[in-house]
């Protein structure tokens, strides 16, 4: 990757009490790049993702996103987080608000937009995920796939520089996965920088620029999807890929 | 006189009722005033304590938990008596009205803090994370995302508890508050006839029965559905 | 401050009086809690009868006594009934008032508990030949009680606290004794002491309840 990195994490360590979850991870993500992180559960991939927007504070190391030092206490973390969208496994939509309310809350409270302005942006974002007609529905009235797409709209409405996806399809029924991946693909085509933790290997092959394999809190191997899936260099990678493909 | 007539003459004596109903009506006003004060200050203080607790400063939280436990464990009448008969020893002499108000407000504060806190902690961690990931501050997340969900969850238990504690305004009669029961009791001893008590009882039923029925409705209406 | 509110000499003098009161509070609780539970069980079982002639009067009964302040009920029995020639005495009045008031609360809790037991349970029991009452007593009630145990305990805490109303009708329970001692000594120490005794007596239950309640609301969310 030749262009300058938009996400640069160096020497990230994370301890949860006595458990050492991340053991010195470096991750660089270039502008417009889609990095796909795979690995067995407990490998630390979700924790790494959550360190990037400081939902978890790393025990040591540095995280710079779009030129902002995320770990500097002087950084306005709430302002910085607007530039980093995040999508969660369990959607985490606000159940007491409509889809539009979910999308516009941060626009109004953090970005300081007026209600009308926020709603215009919010409707456009819902339109991008194909849910313009569901703006007034509450999460309880939407399917899982629709809820996750609203969650994506909530993130992209803030015009982030980078999007983090934490297992976005793991909680979905199989027939609803496609609609979410479709939205992610179109986001990718629009040039969004994305870091995705997921088990959707088909999506990784088709859309990722780079696949990162993590195990036991470290990056074991990374490279183009073809390299990682067809010709992994490390034994652990080969074992994991083999296991996944047998399923 | 038949037995029935004698019964009516004793418990629903027209002359006594006519003579004392303004007293009871005045008592009802005092009861309403006291009840509103208790509800507003008690629930307000309880909510404030729950919000303070969510900030998560350890020593502060221990203090909150202790105060809450204290006012849950003490009978309201004991607190009233303690304030009314105890404080004058250090030259603070709250009236019976103020003593009853403070005591019941403390009790409602304790119960509502606990209910609000349970509501706040019942809101899933993912809600916090999603809100914070979009750049909302701790306070904005608490007010806009967590509290609306928490309050909805807390409305049924809070309603029932509030009714139960507000009925305690009758305890004020022990420390000479001229609320319904107090007025009725003195009317009984003045007239040597129990009719004022019947009037007082009717006043309580008129005031509290609708609230109890409302509480039933609230319980079904706010059953949480996602 | 200590001299006023926790005077050692007065503590020493008042302690035997308070101890007698504490004993009576415990005895009173041991009478009124089972009484309320019995009343509540009857109400809850009757609530299972769907007939409107049972259902509506029952609901009115329960709501009436939930709306009626227990002290008013007590005063009515204590100061009102003698005019009709019925003298029940302090203890009798307390027992009846608690039976009516706390019975209504226990009844509501147990009814909710019974409704939480799946219908399949009583169907299974009836299919093995148990009578309706047997089914309720042996199959439904035990599960119902387990499901609403925190609420039952919370109500029991309230009932024990409520025994302090006995002081108003001259029952020599803890608060009454403390007020006697206070008026003899012109010092609030006995009342402070009584408050401490109440707190120490009931704090363990409060702690336990606070844990159980947090958990139950969390699972509902």
Image (cartoon, coloured by chain):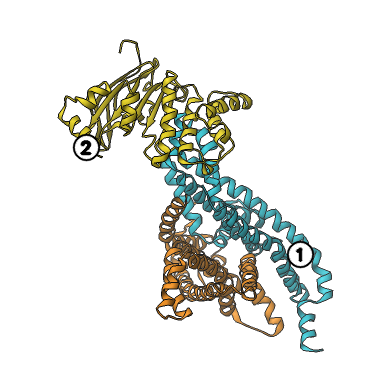
Chain colours: A yellow, B cyan, C orange
Which type of secondary structure does the marked residue at label 2 adopt? helix
Q: Mark 1 packing: few (<14 Cα in 10 Å), some, or many (20+)?
A: many
- Contact (CB < 8 A) between labels 2 and 1? no
**Chain identity of mark 2:** A
Q: Name the residue nearer the viewer: A226 or B184.
A: A226
Horizontal and vertical percent position of residue C221: 47, 49
Residue shown at 51%/74% (left/top)? C41
Q: Is residue C29 left or right of residue B197?
A: left
Within 10 angstroms of label 2, few (less than 14), some, or many (20 or more) residues?
A: few
- Left or right of B170 in this view: C171: left
The residue that mark 1 highlights is: B24
| Rendered location of residue A48, percent (x, y) | 31, 29
The secondary structure type at the circle numbered 1 is: helix
On screen, residue A48 above or below B218 = above
Q: Is residue C2 visible?
A: no
Question: Camera-side residue: B148 or C18?
Answer: B148
Which residue is depicted at the point 61% across and 51% down? Answer: B92
Q: Position of residue A232 (x, y in %)?
A: 19, 25
Q: Are marks 2 and 1 on the same chain?
A: no
Rendered image: mark on residue A243:
2
């Amino acid at each position: 990757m030749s262009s300058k990195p938009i996400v640069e994490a160096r020497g990230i360590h994370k301890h949860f009490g006595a458990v050492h979850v991340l053991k010195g991870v470096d991750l660089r993500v270039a502008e417009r790049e889609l990095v796909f992180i795979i690995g067995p559960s407990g490998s630390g991939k979700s924790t790494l993702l959550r360190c990037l927007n400081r939902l978890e504070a790393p025990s040591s190391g540095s995280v710079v996103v779009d030129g902002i030092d995320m770990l500097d206490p002087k950084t306005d973390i709430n302002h910085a987080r607007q530039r980093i969208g995040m999508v969660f496994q369990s959607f985490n939509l606000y159940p007491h608000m409509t889809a539009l309310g979910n999308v516009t809350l941060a626009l109004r409270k953090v970005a300081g937009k007026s209600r009308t302005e926020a709603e215009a942006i919010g409707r456009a974002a819902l339109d991008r995920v194909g849910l313009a007609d569901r703006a007034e529905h509450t999460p309880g009235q939407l399917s899982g796939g629709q809820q996750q797409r609203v969650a994506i709209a909530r993130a992209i409405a803030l015009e982030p520089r980078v999007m983090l996806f934490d297992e976005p399809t793991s909680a979905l029924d199989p027939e609803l996965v496609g609609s979410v991946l479709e939205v992610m693909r179109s986001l990718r085509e629009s040039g969004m920088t994305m870091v995705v933790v997921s088990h959707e290997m088909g999506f990784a092959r088709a859309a990722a620029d780079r696949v990162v394999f993590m195990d036991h809190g470290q990056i074991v191997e990374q490279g183009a999807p073809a390299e990682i899936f067809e010709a992994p260099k490390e034994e652990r990678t080969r074992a994991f890929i083999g296991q996944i493909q047998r399923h | 006189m038949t037995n029935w007539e004698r019964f009516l003459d004793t418990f629903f004596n027209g002359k006594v009722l006519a003579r004392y109903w303004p007293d009871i009506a005045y008592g009802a006003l005092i009861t309403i005033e006291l009840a509103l004060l208790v509800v507003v200050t008690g629930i307000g203080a309880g909510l404030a304590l729950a919000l303070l607790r969510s900030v998560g400063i350890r020593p502060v939280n221990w203090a909150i938990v202790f105060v809450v436990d204290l006012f849950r464990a003490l009978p309201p009448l004991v607190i009233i008596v303690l304030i009314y008969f105890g404080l004058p020893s250090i030259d603070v002499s709250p009236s019976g009205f103020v003593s009853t108000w403070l005591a019941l407000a403390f009790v409602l504060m304790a119960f509502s803090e606990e209910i609000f806190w349970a509501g706040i902690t019942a809101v899933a961690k993912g809600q916090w994370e999603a809100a914070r990931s979009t750049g909302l501050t701790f306070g904005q997340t608490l007010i806009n995302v967590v509290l609306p969900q928490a309050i909805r969850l807390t409305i049924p238990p809070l309603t029932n508890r509030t009714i139960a504690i507000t009925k305690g305004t009758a305890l004020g009669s022990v420390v000479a508050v001229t609320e319904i029961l107090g007025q009725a009791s003195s009317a009984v001893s003045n007239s040597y006839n129990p009719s004022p008590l019947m009037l007082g009882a009717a006043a309580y039923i008129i005031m509290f029965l609708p609230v109890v029925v409302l509480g039933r409705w609230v319980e079904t209406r706010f059953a949480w559905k996602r | 401050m200590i001299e006023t509110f926790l005077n050692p000499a007065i503590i020493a003098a008042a302690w035997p009086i308070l101890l007698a009161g504490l004993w009576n509070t415990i005895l009173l609780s041991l009478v009124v809690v089972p009484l309320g539970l019995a009343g509540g069980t009857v109400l809850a079982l009757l609530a299972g009868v769907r007939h409107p002639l049972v259902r509506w009067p029952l609901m009115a009964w329960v709501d009436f006594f939930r709306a009626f302040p227990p002290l008013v009920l007590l005063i009515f029995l204590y100061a009102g009934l003698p005019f009709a020639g019925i003298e029940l005495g302090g203890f009798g009045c307390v027992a009846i008032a608690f039976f009516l008031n706390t019975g209504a609360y226990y009844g509501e809790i147990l009814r909710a508990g019974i409704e939480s037991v799946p219908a399949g349970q009583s169907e299974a029991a009836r299919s093995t030949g148990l009578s309706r009452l047997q089914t309720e007593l042996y199959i439904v009630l035990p599960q119902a009680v387990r499901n609403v145990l925190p609420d039952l305990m919370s109500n029991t805490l309230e009932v024990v606290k409520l025994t302090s109303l006995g002081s108003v009708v001259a029952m020599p329970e803890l608060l009454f004794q403390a007020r006697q001692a206070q008026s003899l000594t012109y010092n609030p120490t006995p009342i402070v002491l009584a408050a401490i005794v109440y707190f120490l007596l009931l704090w363990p239950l409060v702690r336990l309840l606070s844990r159980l309640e947090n958990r139950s609301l969390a699972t509902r969310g």
